[in-house]
Amino acid sequence: MEKVDKYRSFIYGEGEKNTTWVHGGPPNFDAVDKLFEEGRTQEWLPGSLEEKVQRLVKTMEMELFHKANPNDYKAIDPSRFLFAVNGRNALTLAELGKIGGGYNGFLQTSLPEEMRLYDYTKETMESSHEVFKTTFPRGFAFEIIQAYSGPPVMVYKFRHWAYMEGPFKGYRPTGDLVELFGVGVYEVDEQMRVIKVEFFYDSGELLGALMKGGKSIAGSSVDMQQIGCPFLDNAGHKK
């Protein structure tokens, strides 16, 4: 029996037999899917707008992170694809790749370099994945909370969550639930391929939570509330 992913398309089957995967084969989402099923706040009916949008988002993220050749993308039109966060200039697929894609694309910031807890300009795709895989060993789950409109322009509210069970850039793991809420806007073509995405969210909501355990320095820890933190102090401001 052919293997099927419950929440994503274009991983298995005849259409993927020639796909070039970043790690040599299809990714395994068992751990993050378990986290998703245990922690989701909504369970959408198959075929509903929310379920369709959620599947598309998960599929797009899977292709961007795990398919090595853009010609293998099926949820994305690589020739027209644009990616933007928080009103910044949209990046083409090639431009997104130059900054390391993935987490680096999501965590772009205009903060001065000395104030960046996570500096996307100093991370590669590989190093950024390692950073967050270490911090969130069970993955970073995603759900649609509400869909506001259907194709060709889909607007939705989302929630990302994980447990900080590993260190982050020297900050101690807390074991706490870490959540990130935001709004996504997807534009698709007549084949339901994504041609533009834009996300709006406060990156300080995520990064501030990762600093709560304090940073270990020469055997001691730093209390971020005592020294002040640009992410915590400006949590309501767009980065």
Image: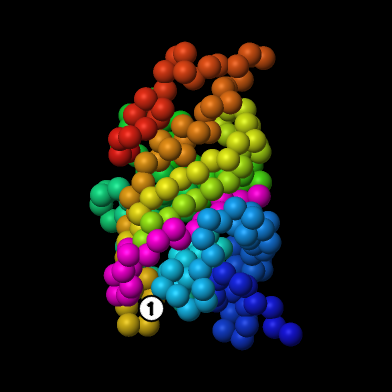
The residue located at (62%, 73%) in the rendering is: 5
Q: 175 or 100: which is nearer to us?
A: 175
26 on left or right of 43: right
6 on left or right of 185: right
Whether residue 204 appears in magenta in the rendering, the answer is no
Q: 159 or 76: which is nearer to us?
A: 159
Q: Position of residue 155 (x, y in %)?
A: 32, 63
Which element type, helix, strand or loop, lies under badge 1?
Answer: loop
Looking at numbered disc 1 in the image, what kind of residue is underneath it? Answer: Met
Q: Which residue is mark 1?
A: 192
**The C terminus: image quadrant:** top left
227 on left or right of 111: right
The residue located at (47%, 39%) in the rendering is: 206
Q: Is residue 171 above or below residue 108?
A: above
Residue 130 in sight from this viewpoint? no
Q: Position of residue 231 (x, y in %)?
A: 40, 30
Magenta stretch, main secondary structure, is strand
**The N terminus: image quadrant:** bottom right
Whether residue 147 appears in magenta in the rendering, the answer is yes
Counting every numbered tag in the picture gives 1
Q: Is residue 158 above or below residue 16?
A: above
Task: Place residue 187 in its image quadrant.
Answer: bottom left
Magenta segment: 138-155
Residue 208 in sight from this viewpoint? yes
Task: Place residue 163 in its image quadrant.
Answer: top right
